[in-house]
Amino acid sequence: MVSREALGLVTLAGYRPGPAMLVTAAFIGPGTVTACASAGIGFGYALLWALAFATIATIILQNMAARVAIVTGQGLAEAILAAASSPPLRWAIAALIFASLAIGNSAYQAGNISGTGAGLKLLGLAGVSPALLSLATGSLAAGLIIIGKPAWLEKLLIALVLAMSMAFIGGLAVIQVDWAAAARGLVPALPTGSLFTAIALIGTTVVPYNLFLHAASVRGKFAADRAGLAASNLDTAISVALGGLLSMAIVIMGAATAAMPGTSAGPLDDVALRLEELFGAPARIVFALGLVGAGFSSALTAPLATGYVLGEMLGGQDNPVRRTRIFKRTALAVVAIGTGFAFFAVNPVELILIAQSANGLLLPILAAFLLWVASRRQSLGAFANGTVANVAGAAVVLVCAGLGLRLILRAAGVWP
């Protein structure tokens, strides 16, 4: 039986934001804002095509992850580990997942919290200590995880995404955009010195932990039939496309200020201050509001995703109480570690290097296993991948392998 919610999502006219909005809330974080702002400042509109490609690739992978979860009733970690018949392989995959999510998200959480503080400073709190802003942000995130229920945390994150949309996309209304040049930027091209930046733009969008987060959030939301899957696909397409537009808007804001001299303050402050100088205080304010939304939404989704995955791996399928306990403790640990790094202004270089290496290994492996699981009729029956989906998925896996190699070489100091 198809739920009213699923039927309402099948047509665009009746669309209501669903669990895929969590994916957008997750990948539009301070790192993405920094990468997109740097791309716009350094190369103008020329790399918009990289974000368009990354958006399509993300939709393909997220649709597969959601379909696996809806049809099998399992989280993605459960489904992949169950499909791996060899115990050594299961242990190896579990170790990579743990290193990537538990260690990596703890380290990156510091950036999410610091990014929120950076946005608050641009809004007029420059006189407040960064340490206090970090503590306040971390405490709020922890409090929401402790007292929050998944349904209204999801609504809060959807609200943050919509706020970011109004800030970043709406901000284009207060600046001057060369739309013809922006359109030309959708044609693949690599200006001199732009290869690493283009790869970084793709890498900030195609994120391993979003696959786990999405799979966990769709269970019980859509019926395991064609109408339910169509509803989930539409939710994913609209949500991720919105995220792609947000990223492009940030690139365009950076491009609008590219001709101005830079400062030593960093790309975020550069864009905000340049926007204010060119177009007045409203331009700086909307950029800062978007940065606050990006930082805080990622400060919630990173610990939530980590908690979901460790709950799946360690909680036991038939013990929901234990899974919930592991979920909350893990999520709070990620918040606490990230807040500590941000509070003491510690740069967690070694943890980030471990996380980058683990992500470099996990991303192509996870994408390949996801493609395999989504193609298995033993798991998905009539809803397994067809030829077109397999070809599209294989192309994305190859790109993920290239991204993975880049992350490993970067972590080793070979590739800047």
Image (cartoon, rainbow, N blue to C red):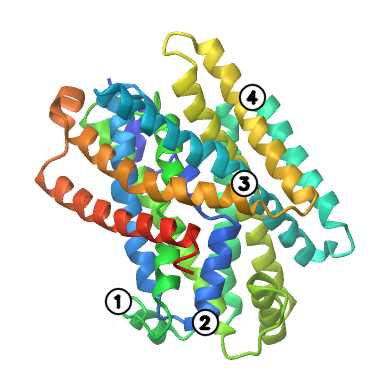
Q: Residues within 10 Å of mark 3 (few under 14, many from 20)?
A: many
Question: Looking at the image, which residue is at 45% across and 13% down?
Answer: 316
Report the amino acid beneath label 4: Arg
Residue behind mark 2: 42
Q: Where is residue 245 in the image (x, y as percent from the top left)?
A: 44, 63
Tell me which numbered mark, 4 or 1, is placed earlier along the sequence: 1
Whether 134 is drawn above or below 178: the answer is above
Tag 2, which secondary structure?
helix
The quadrant of the rendering that contains the N terminus is: top left
Q: What's the amino acid at mark 3?
A: Ala
Q: Residue 329 carries which label?
A: 4
> Nearer the N terminus, badge 3 or badge 4?
3
Q: Residues within 10 Å of mark 2 (few under 14, many from 20)?
A: many
| Gap between marks 1 and 3 measured at Cα | 33 Å
* Label annotation for residue 107: 3
Horizontal side of 85 relative to 416 (left or right) equals: left
Mark 4 or 1, which is nearer the eye? 4
